[in-house]
Image (cartoon, grey):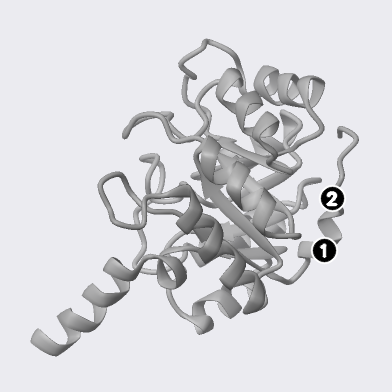
Amino acid sequence: MPHTLINLDSLAGQLVVSAQAYPGEPMRDPRTTAQVAASAVIGGAAGIRVQGIADIQFTRAAVEVPVIGLWKDGHSGVFITPTLQHALSCASAGAHIVAIDGTRRPRPDGLTLAETVAGIHAGSNALVMADCGSLDDAVAAAEAGADIIGTTLAGYSGERPKTDGPDLELIAQIAAAGLDAPLIAEGRIHTPAQARAALDAGAFAVVVGTAITHPASITGWFKDALTA
């Protein structure tokens, strides 16, 4: 593990808020992302997850909690911080933790996951969060040296069905595997009860994004309920 400026214990049992907006949306502005992140911290978020170099930079300046940074490049396959260079750029922008695709799929730069993790550790002070889609991914990511395991890609990598809410079965499986890296539950956690269930299933911490920081989706849920 690299020398890092954060203590992961600060995230134990806590909420991490993912503040992201999609291209073309009114909130797709790094200044807005930072404001949303700061608002989440006021509400009790112990960490923030953001996408994009400028968003990482602005958010680091706006909050005092650990920032998980990533860089989405593309829309399919390995696109969450897909290469070592993407990862090092996130670290240089100020991410305390760099989130990368942690699946066993081929990476665009031809490096293995272990080589990518080692490269991030050697080239920065950042920790590595491996966004996984299955138990096999999680085991491989831990063996590759990832500092944190995430369930971010459960239901999106083709190995597991996409559950309506969080994949509690996968969370429990990874927690029971006794991996060295702590498990952060992420993906389709839309209610406080689901967040609690993820923690009870064995997660170290919980990431919530859409249900807190994406007004278009939240509005749609209410609209659909009224017009069903």
The relative height of residue 50 versus residue 188 in the rendered view (above or below) is above
Which residue was labeled with disc 2? 6
Kind of residue indicated by mark 1: Ser
Which residue is rendered at x = 24% and y = 83% of the image? 222
Residue 65 or residue 121, whichever sits in front = 65
Q: Quadrant of the N terminus?
A: top right
Q: Judging from the image, what secondary structure is the residue with disc 2 in?
A: loop
Most extreme residue toward the left, as rendered? Answer: 227
Q: Residues within 10 Å of mark 1 (few under 14, many from 20)?
A: few
Q: Position of residue 33 (x, y in %)?
A: 49, 56
Q: Quadrant of residue 214?
A: bottom left
Which residue was labeled with disc 1? 10
The relative height of residue 6 versus residue 79 in the rendered view (above or below) is below
Counting every numbered tag in the picture gives 2
Which residue is rendered at x = 50% and y = 50% of the image? 152
Most extreme residue toward the top, as rendered? Answer: 110
Q: Distance from label 2 to label 1 (Cα)? A: 8 Å
Q: Judging from the image, what secondary structure is the residue with disc 1 in?
A: helix
Residue 148 or residue 171, whichever sits in front = 148
- Asked if residue 41 shows in the view, the reply is yes
Q: Position of residue 187 (x, y in %)?
A: 46, 59
From the viewer's perspective, tell me whether residue 129 is left or right of residue 224.
right
Q: Position of residue 119 (x, y in %)?
A: 73, 19
Pointer 2 and pointer 1: residues touching (CB < 8 Å)?
yes
Kind of residue indicated by mark 2: Ile
